[in-house]
Amino acid sequence: MCGIFGIIGSHSNLKKDITSLARFASRRGKDSSGILVNNSAYSILTANYDIRKLIKKINFKNTNMILGIGRLITNGNDDCQPYKKKNIIVFHNGIVINDDELFTEEEISRIDKIDTEIIAALAEKFLDRNNLKNTINTILSKCKGMISSAICFTELGKLVLFTNNGSLYYAE
């Protein structure tokens, strides 16, 4: 599957620690990689190679958030993560097995082949700005399969981590 990692907040050893986290994420997926960086604005870098190589392209100056993924491709060979749809950016480990059906049932136009697109599309469709937990619960109730995810709602300045299989670890 994939390895998602990140650091939020100011951090004196940011480059060293992100490099270390990327090394671990690389073990989970070397097919492609992606990074979301916030240093006064959000920017995304993606590549069809290992995350450890992509990390070298980050400007760490004034960075207050970095999220990354080492991806093992299960579908959507030409698509990358993080997946962006308007002001929603999704990192996803796992596989949604009913994504085709959900695009039809929810009357959402599909753009790409990656299953992660349905998570972003559902987040956009069912966004409850006052209660992101409702948004996430709706996504989890509709999607079949395994999901460990980080969704950045850039317009709201919020990041939500969630899973339906228990493989989510974080530290403060």
Image (cartoon, grey):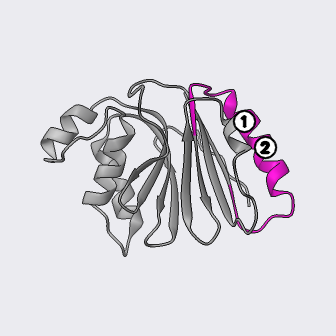
Residue 97: x, y in percent?
A: 32, 29
Q: Is residue 133 magenta?
A: no
Residue appearing at x 74%, y 61% in the figure = 172
User: Under tag 1, what secondary structure?
Assistant: helix
Q: Which residue is mark 1?
A: 52
Residue appearing at x 63%, y 28% in the figure = 28
Residue 141: x, y in percent?
A: 30, 47
User: Under tag 2, what secondary structure?
Assistant: helix
Residue appearing at x 76%, y 48% in the figure = 18
Residue 59: x, y in percent?
A: 72, 57
**Residues in magenta?**
7-33
Amino acid type at image mark 2: Thr
Q: Which residue is mark 2?
A: 19
Q: Is 61 left, or right, of 135 in this rendering? A: right
Residue 138 in view in this figure: no
Q: Are marks 1 and 2 in contact (CB under 8 Å)?
A: yes
Q: Residues within 10 Å of mark 2 (few under 14, many from 20)?
A: some
Work out which quarter of the rendered image holds the N terminus and state it. top right
Residue 132: x, y in percent?
A: 40, 66
Residue 128 occupies quadrant? bottom left
